[in-house]
Amino acid sequence: MSKNKAAIPESQKALDRFKMEAAADVGVNLKDGYNGDLTSREAGSVGGQMVKKMVEKYENDIKSNG
């Protein structure tokens, strides 16, 4: 378990769901808890997909609000 604590505890659950969703999008099988058996490529794919989705959301929000 991570030593980092979320400032808002509910945000950790949302982030975990988001991570699982991103992993499914790129075909990486994440488990609840420890995932140290992932390759660097797999972990990077998940992180990259998360960033991609965040950027897309930001861009869509800017377009709809601006």
Image (cartoon, rainbow, N blue to C red):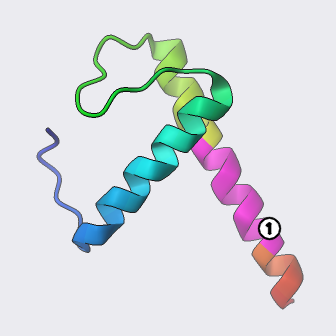
Describe the element under mark 1 as helix, strand or loop. Answer: helix
Residue furthest bottom in the image: 66
Residue at the location (55% across, 32% down)?
23
* Residue range of the region highlighted in magenta in the rendering: 50-60
Q: Position of residue 38 (x, y in %)?
A: 39, 14
Q: Quadrant of the C terminus?
A: bottom right
Q: Position of residue 55 (x, y in %)?
A: 70, 57
Q: Which of the two residues, 31 or 19, is positioned nearer the viewer here?
A: 31
Q: Position of residue 63 (x, y in %)?
A: 88, 78
Residue at the location (47% across, 43% down)?
19
Q: Is residue 11 above or below residue 38?
A: below
Q: Position of residue 17 (x, y in %)?
A: 45, 50
What residue would you read off at disc 1?
Answer: 59
Residue at the location (23% across, 26% down)?
34
Q: Is residue 12 magenta?
A: no
Mark 1: amino acid? Glu
